[in-house]
Image (tube, grey):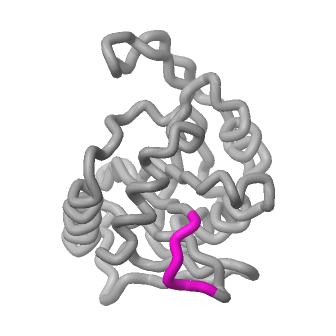
Amino acid sequence: MLTLNFPSFPVLETERLILREHALTDAHDLFQMRTNEEVMRYIDRERPKAIKDMETFISTFNDGFKQGQHIAWIMALKENPDVMIGSIGYWRTNLVNYRAEIGYMLLPAYWRKGFVSEALIKTIAFGFDQMNLHSIQANINPGNDASRQILRKHGFVKEAYFREDYYFNGKFLDSEIYSLLNKL
């Protein structure tokens, strides 16, 4: 069975980005991102009500990393590593089957500049090389064409389309599932 046991939080770097651990000081920026209707348009989750919700989220998420359940990074520009521009990471880790779900979001000011693609390259490599994942899954809202395109660009293939499999805000929604296998 897969285990996620890192001695410290792995900071990753790309050409323009630092991918680092969530800090409580990110709560305000994270709140701004997760309450932004443009960002959340295709992310069918409850919106936080207060910055305190994000502080709790960060603490809970960091505890989950320490317990080997998941890992997620704040995306920040190298020239300003304390300011979050987005997030990317693995959750819903299926340790028995060496599989994890990847997710990402980015503030609109940084859209269409290649930041998600840059972060995906690094986190996919980390998932396969350091986490020893066999497969990476992505679950998207079928209306999210931008996410579909970026997943395909990075080799993900569509595995399934589930009709009305997700209940949110009083209605049943569809899900589209993509995956990438470790070719090693």
Assign the N terminus to one quadrant of the image: bottom left
Q: Is residue 180 above or below residue 157?
A: below
Q: Which percent across, then down, holds residue 91?
A: 37, 53
Horizontal relation, residue 111 to residue 162: left or right: right
Q: Is residue 165 visible?
A: yes
At x 52% / y 65%, what residue is drawn? 127
Q: Which is the main secondary structure of the residues drawn in magenta? A: loop
Q: How many marks?
A: 0
Q: Is residue 20 above or below residue 182?
A: below
At x 54% / y 53%, what residue is drawn? 104
- Whether residue 7 is in magenta: the answer is no
Q: Which residues are magenta?
A: 80-85
Q: Is residue 138 above or below residue 14?
A: above
Q: Is residue 184 visible?
A: no
Q: Which percent across, then down, holds residue 145?
A: 71, 31
At x 64% / y 61%, what residue is drawn? 120
Tell me the quarter of the picture where residue 66 sits: bottom left
Assign the C terminus to one quadrant of the image: bottom right
Horizontal relation, residue 84 to residue 56: left or right: right
Q: Which percent across, then down, holds residue 170?
A: 31, 12
Tell me the quarter of the picture where residue 32 sits: bottom left
Q: Is residue 40 above or below residue 142?
A: below
- Whether residue 82 is in magenta: the answer is yes
At x 43% / y 11%, what residue is drawn? 164
Q: Nearer the viewer, residue 159 or 61?
A: 61
Q: Which percent across, then down, holds residue 76?
A: 58, 75
